[in-house]
Image: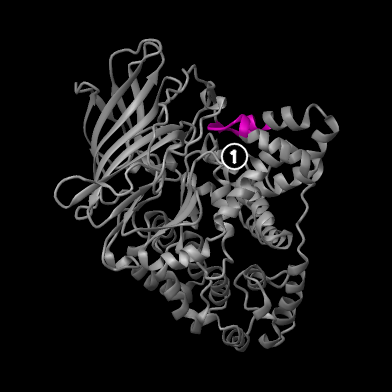
Amino acid sequence: MNRKLTGLVSALALSAVLAACGQPGGKSDMPPLPASATAPIQYVRDIHSFARPEIARVRNVDLDLTADFATKTLSGTATLDITAEPGATQIILDVRNLDIRAITDEAGTALPFVLGAIDPVMGQPLTVTFPAFKAGEQRKIVIRYATRPDAAALQWLTPAQTAGGQQPYLFSQGQAILTRTWIPTQDSPGIRQTYSAKITVPDALKAVMSAEMLTPDGKAAGTGQHSFSFRMTNPVPPYLIALAVGDLAFASEGSRTGVWTEPSRLDAAKAEFSEVGQMVDAAEALYGPYRWGRYDLLILPPSFPFGGMENPRLTFATPTVVAGDKSLVSLVAHELAHSWSGNLVTNSTWSDIWLNEGFTTYFENRIMESVYGRDRALMLQVLGWNDLQSSLKTMPAADTRMHVDLTGRDPDDGLNDIPYEKGAAFLRTVERIVGRDAFDVWLKGYFERNAFRPMSSAQFLTDIRTHLVKGDAALETRLQLDNWVYQPGLPSNAIAPVSTALTTVDTAAKAFFADKGPASAIPWSGWSTQERQHFLAWRPTGLRAGTDWLTPPQLADLESTLKLRDEGNAEVLFGWLQIAVAHRYQPAVPTLEHFLTSQGRRKFVMPLFTSLWAEGDWGRPIATRIYARARPGYHPVTSGSVDALVGVPTGQ
C-alpha cells in the first residue's frame, strides 16, 4: 500500500532558455513553464524506487557519455544537481548493473558511496554521503561510470540488423524502471528532472535524443568521433530520457514536425506520417498548447519492443506501423496524446499507470475522430473494448483494478489492456454522463492545473470532484468514480461502444466462421484495416481459445483467398497467425517464423509465443526452434518476457 509523503521542497531551479538550435535547426522553441511546475510536490512513496525525494532529490541530470560499439558500453559522467532538506547528509539513487567508478563533488573531492543489496526487479540503491545541507542550498555530484553490454534499457544492433546494413545502431528504452541501467539517478516517474547531454559517437553516425538538439551537425571530438549536445528544460520523469545512435536521416513535415529514420526508409516514413502536423493541431484545439516545442518521429529498426514510446519531442516508433496506407497511424495519435497525458501529467507510481495510458487512449481516439472522422474512431473504440473484454475474462480479478497493487512485482506486469482500455472506457463514461462540452472544459483544465507534475489516483479523484462534480451528490452517484478506480471488473454504468461498420463485419464473420460459408463471400478488398482486424478477431460464442472451430479446408480457403501469406499489414497478419496457431495449421508456420524473426514488437511476439506454448506437443517444439533464431534480435524488454514463458535461465 502506498504511503503519501509531503515533501517540503524548494522551487525548481530552472535556467533561462538560451538561443539555440532546434531540431534540426533554428532557435529554441521551448515555451515557458506554467506556474504549476514550480509548486510544492506531494510525493507518493514509490515501491519501485529506493529514492527518498522528500529528504534529497535530483533536479537535473547532465550526461557526458561516449558510445563504444566494440564493447557495447556507454561510459563517462552523470552530473546530478541535487537539493535536500536542511541537515540531510545522503542521497539515494537507483542503479542496476552499472559499473560505478568514482563519485565526487563539483570541486572534485571524492564522496563516499555504498551500493546496497541487489533486488532482482529494482536493482540496487546507490547511497552517496556528503556534508550536511543548509537551507536553500543546491549542489552537484559527479558520477563516473559505465554501462554493461547487457544493460536492459539499451540495445546494440549490428549492421546486419539494420535496414542499411552498413552501420551499427543503438537505442534506449527506459520505461518502466530501466533508465537506472544506463543513468544513475532517482528512477521514479514522480521525481521529474531536467537534463542535458553530450553524446560522443563514431563519425559515420548521428545521435538523437528526446530533447532539443543543440548541435545538429555534431562537433569534432577526437579522431574518428564527433559529439552531439542536447537540452531538455522541461522537467520529465526519468523513463522519458531517451537516446538513439545510428545512420539517420531527417525529413521535415512542416514547421514543427518531421521524421527520422535510416536513409533507405525515409521516403516511405515521410509519406506515411504526412498528417502528423494535423494531429498536433487537432490535439491543441482539444486540450491546450503543445508544450514541448517540436514533435518528431524516429522510426527504429524492427527490434524495437513497443509500438511506440512517447519520448518528448521525439516519439520512438516501430517500423511495423509503416503499412503504406496510413491505416495504423492511430499509434502516432496515441504517442502524441502522451505529450499531455503522461509527459505533462505523469502517474506518480506505476500502480497508477492508467493515469498515463487510459487518458492517452481516450485522447488518441478524440484526435483520430478530429482528423479521420467519427466512424473510424468508433471502430477503434470497439476493437479496444473487445480487447478489454478478453482481458477481463482471463486476468485475476485483483489485476482488473485500474489502481493495481504491484508490490513485489515488475511494473511491466501492469502494462495490459486494463489501464489502457478500462481507463479509456471510464473517461468515455464520464464524458457521456456530464456531456462532452463540460468534460472537455474539465480535462483541458486538468492538464493545465497539473502540468509537469506527478499524479496519483487519489489526487485525480480530488481534482475531478473539485472541478467537475462540484458537490453534486446525484452526479457523484451516477459516475461511480471509486468503483472504476479501485474495484475489479466494470461498474454497472459501463456501456459498450457500437460501430455500424463493424456490425456489418460481424455478419460476414458469422457467415464464414460459424455458418461455414466460402471465403470468396468475404468483402475483404473493400474493408479498412480496422474492419479486417475485427473480422479476424471474431470467435463463435461459447468456444474457448484453441478450440478447433475451423476445418483445415476452411483455413486453407481463408489463407489463399485473402492472400494472408503475403499480407504486409502487421496488425492483420497478427490476427491471422493467432487463428493459425490456435488450429495448429502447419502451412502457416513459415509465415509465422518469418513474422517472429523479422520484428520484435512485444505486442505481437509475446501473444504468439504464448499461443504456441499453449499448444503443447505441437506448439512448443516450434516455439523453441523459432525463439532460438529470433532471440538474438529482440530487445531485452521482449526477450525477458518470452524467456519467462519458455524457461530460458536469467542471464542466458
* Left or right: residue 600 compared with residue 558: left
Query: Residue 43: percent from the left, percent from the top?
Result: 52, 26
Q: Is residue 141 above or below residue 648?
A: above
**Where is mark 1, residue-wise?**
289
Secondary structure type for disc 1? loop
Question: Which residue, as the protein is rendered here, is positioned at the far right?
Answer: 474
Q: Exactly how many numbered labels are in the figure?
A: 1
Q: Position of residue 69 (x, y in %)?
A: 23, 54
Name the residue at 42% across, 40% down: 27
| In front of the other: 68 or 650 | 68
Furthest residue toward left = 223
The residue sitting at 77% across, 75% down in the picture is: 507
Count residues near mark 1 (Cα–Cα under 10 Å), then give few for <14, some for 14-19, many for 20+.
Answer: some
Observer able to see residue 405: no
Kindly identify the residue that appears in the image at 39 percent across and 62 percent down: 301
Coloring scheme used: one colour
582 horizontally vs 619: left or right: right
Residue 122 locus on image (x, y percent): 39, 39
Residue range highlighted in magenta: 448-461
Q: Residue at x 21, y 21 (%)?
A: 107
136 vs 2: above or below: above
The quarter of the image holding the N terminus is top right
Report x, y in % for residue 438. 77, 38
Instruction: Inspect the magenta stretch and tell me whether residue 453 lies in it.
Output: yes
Say if residue 216 shows up in the picture: yes
Q: Quadrant of the C terminus?
A: bottom left
The residue type indicated by label 1 comes to: Pro
**Is 8 in front, or is 277?**
277
The front one of 511 and 434 is 434
Tell me the quarter of the picture where residue 547 sits.
bottom right
Which quarter of the picture shows residue 15?
top left
